[in-house]
Image (cartoon, rainbow, N blue to C red):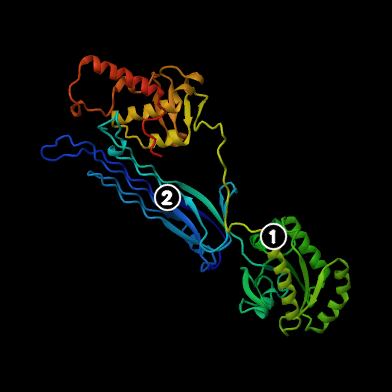
Amino acid sequence: MTTFVDRVELHVAAGSGGHGCASVHREKFKPLGGPDGGNGGRGGDVILVVDQSVTTLLDYHHSPHRKATNGKPGEGGNRSGKDGQDLILPVPNGTVVLDKAGNVLADLVGHGTAYVAAQGGRGGLGNAALASARRKAPGFALLGVPGDMQDIVLELKTVADVALVGYPSAGKSSLIAAMSAARPKIADYPFTTLVPNLGVVTAGETVYTIADVPGLIPGASQGKGLGLEFLRHVERCSVLVHVLDTATLESDRDPVSDLDLIEAELKQYGGLGDRPRIVLLNKIDVPDGKDLAEMVRPDLQARGYRVFEASAVAHIGLKELSYALADLVAKARAAKPQEEATRIVIRPKAVDDAGFTVVREEDGLFRVRGEKPERWVRQTDFSNDEAVGYLADRLNRLGVEDELMKAGARTGDGVAIGPEENAVVFDWEPTVMAGAEMLGRRGEDHRFEAPRPAVTRRREKQAERDEAEREYDDFEPF
């Protein structure tokens, strides 16, 4: 049965926003009290939060689909809908968030560090919020926006100061057990350790964590054995310790060749060339092991390595090793620049980004893509002509109609807004003010106003058209 998981694919879905409400205030002697539809509630976010009590991604291995709650719709009487509840997903310290293509989205280090994996949908505006001096009685409201749906990959990279690397059965787990309070599984056969083990070591005033990396054998960086699954746990370590077995029963192995092979795998994996190294000749409690350690020590020192001899079983040489590691860890911490606990990759938009694109496809269809146009389409109730006209005005003021003309669109050409799997398609009818000539002064109810002379009404209507041509947007709520 699986008990440790350090890589999972997670499917997260944020909550959708609640719909806005189209309502008119009514009471005795006030049949036209004005719009009072409330806004819809925001959908809940899906948030990854580092929790020190969590050490594995096992829960998400068994339950990879997670969803936050939706926002509630608005109601009459200016009552806004309740926001959806955020879904908090605890992850281990050192979790890296990637997209399906392998791009890093966030690197979560430090207790309490949070990352929003899926953003909840915005609640739709009620007709009270859509009312303005020109649009006094909107007969429509905006729909809530669906929440984000993301497929992400979580990778756990152990956060430790020292990494023990070496062949299986070199004694790495025994060293952790002897130097700390950790009690990993120990046996004398290869691949005893199937998960990284962590231990806390105190040497003088320095307290540091030490981890073993299981399964490193020749070819590990290409996927042989277990090494490829756990090499990522070396990346965050400040110091590497080569644990070399001086009492191996395999005749074709010796400490120097083991060191060369493991170094070749680390080099092939990449990114570890700047880590300080220490060589530990382990199992010197065995007579032949002590003799072999004395033989290879000069060769290793000639290569520039600091060499220590120890026995995890007999507790020989562990104190000197622990203090040497504490000194290297302290130097690494002092040299490390101060930075925020988490690293989130931000990809800003270009300064000349218009917010949308218009592309003519092979079949002659013009496709409009962009965050704003696609969101506005999702917010529109297409059963309401007034809401459709409001969408047309917003698209025109954004510049979509001008770009369609530049792209060669003509009356009657097909235009799609959104991706292929979820697009709104319509036949294009260019107008001076999209929708305005067809539907007139949307949302205006003359019963709210006293009668005025015809000439006054004509002047006001002309002034309104002039204002509409200059105005960028009636109401940009977001």
- In percent of width and height, residue 252 lies at 82, 70
Q: Residue at x 46, y 59 (%)?
A: 89
In-image side of 290 versus 89 (left or right): right
Question: Which tag, 1 or 2, sits closer to the chain's start?
Answer: 2
Q: Position of residue 408 (x, y in %)?
A: 50, 18
Disc 1, SS: loop
For disc 1, the marked residue is: 224
The mark lying in front, picked from 1 and 2, is 2
Disc 2 crowd rating (10 Å Cα; few below 14, some 14-19, many 20+) is: many
Is 361 located above or below residue 68 in the figure? above
Q: What element carries label 2?
A: loop
Crowding near pointer 1: few (<14 within 10 Å), some, many (20+)?
A: some
Locate residue 159: give its quadrant: bottom right
Picture coordinates of residue 194 (x, y %)?
62, 69
Q: Does residue 80 appear in the picture of this structure?
A: yes
Note whether residue 165 is visible. Answer: no
Disc 1 residue type (three-letter):
Lys
Q: Is residue 465 left or right of residue 421?
A: left
Q: In front here: 307 or 192?
A: 307
In the image, residue 111 sits, relative to residue 352, either above or below, namely below
Please give the count of numbered marks on the rendered protein: 2
Q: What label sits on residue 14 in the rendered view? A: 2
As drawn, which residue projects farthest toward the top?
Answer: 455
Quadrant where the image shows the C terminus = top left
Residue at x-position 48% and y-position 32%: 369
Q: In which quarter of the image is residue 283?
A: bottom right
Query: Residue at coordinates 25% horizontally, 32% vertically from top-left?
Result: 137
